[in-house]
Image (cartoon, rainbow, N blue to C red):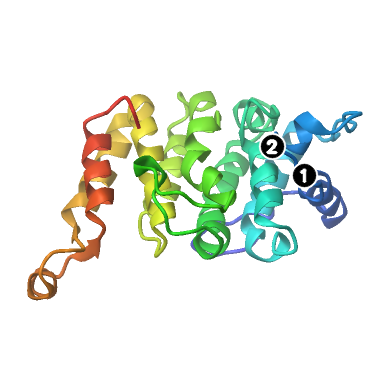
Amino acid sequence: MTNGIFGAYDFGVQDELYLEWIAYVFDRPATPKGWYFDLDPEPPKFEATPSEIVGLIGKTMVRSGADLVEFTNAQVDDGLSYIFSEACSRHSDNFGDGTVCLDLKVAAIRAMKHLYKDCFEPRCDSRLGHIGEHSENPLNYMAYMLWDVTPIPYVNRQVPDALAACVEVLEFALHSSNDACIEGAVHGLGHLLTICRELAKPVIHQFLATTMDFDALPQDREASGLRPIRKELRHYARQARRGARWL
């Protein structure tokens, strides 16, 4: 067991299996649709139990800053899509498997804070996808769309602790220094409003209450004591709080 702000759990997987997983998921050529669609013949299925898959995902998140550095942004984006998107694999469905203990699920979800802090924040372009700011960086896609494609909140819609962990991750990401991470967090909270409104809406409200438009007058920013951020992000958060369907 390890202690820290990301929870306490060793994720229950041996390093040998973890290294096999990292190679399987990320050590692939970047292809137009992703290796899981474009490789022919299709690679054999990665064999692991539901608990091992959840543990492997958690361990990947915790170590994403160090263990994914050798892979390109395109490879990391493909790998994260494979892990989280139902269109690419069913791995994230294991967060809804009744044989996986709740503590492991919650620890693995909370470990996604590392993904934002150690991977997305330093590697993504600080661009906003929802207003069409173009980025050549493929990793920006998952920073923006992760909570659009992952089933994790939906397979846990009756599990308050797991939903609280999802909201906790997104609240953490709202404090990022990278606008792409903040945008992705607002986007995710907008989706979670449909599942756990009582948890997600206060986080959006607090974000708006503690920030102000970056282009406000310098003296106004200093006097307010509020965190200056781009006005587009605050507008996006207001839309999320209202439950805008286009989020």
In the image, 108 versus 64, the foreground residue is 64
> Which residue is rendered at x = 43% and y = 53% of the image?
180
Q: Find residue 25 and report its image quarter.
A: top right
Please tell me whether residue 3 is drawn above or below residue 44 in the rendered image: below
Three-letter amino acid code of the residue under disc 1: Val
User: Looking at the picture, how far across and down is residue 200, in whole percent?
Assistant: 32, 38
Q: Secondary structure at mark 1?
A: helix
Image quarter of the C terminus: top left
> Which residue is rendered at x = 41% and y = 39% of the image?
188
**Which residue carries the number 2 mark?**
82
Q: Find residue 63 and report its image quarter.
A: bottom right
Badge 2: residue crowd in 10 Å (few <14, some 14–19, many ≥20):
many
In the image, 162 versus 148, the foreground residue is 148
In the image, 214 versus 109, the foreground residue is 214
In the image, 185 versus 50, the foreground residue is 185
Q: Secondary structure at mark 2?
A: helix
Q: Identify the mark at residue 54; answer none if there is no mark.
A: none
> Which residue is rendered at x = 30% and y = 30% of the image?
197
Horizontal side of residue 237 vs 33, given as left or right: left
Horizontal side of residue 161 vs 92, given as left or right: left
Please tell me whether residue 116 is drawn above or below residue 237 in the rendered image: below
Please tell me whether residue 199 is drawn above or below residue 159 in the rendered image: below
User: Looking at the picture, how far across and down is residue 103, in whole percent?
Assistant: 58, 42
**Which residue carries the number 1 mark?**
25
Image quarter of the N terminus: bottom right
Reading the chain from its start, which is encountered first: label 1 or label 2? Answer: 1
Three-letter amino acid code of the residue under disc 2: Tyr
User: Looking at the picture, how far across and down is residue 234, in whole percent?
Assistant: 23, 49
Do the residues bearing badges 1 and 2 touch, measured as CB atoms within 8 Å?
Answer: yes
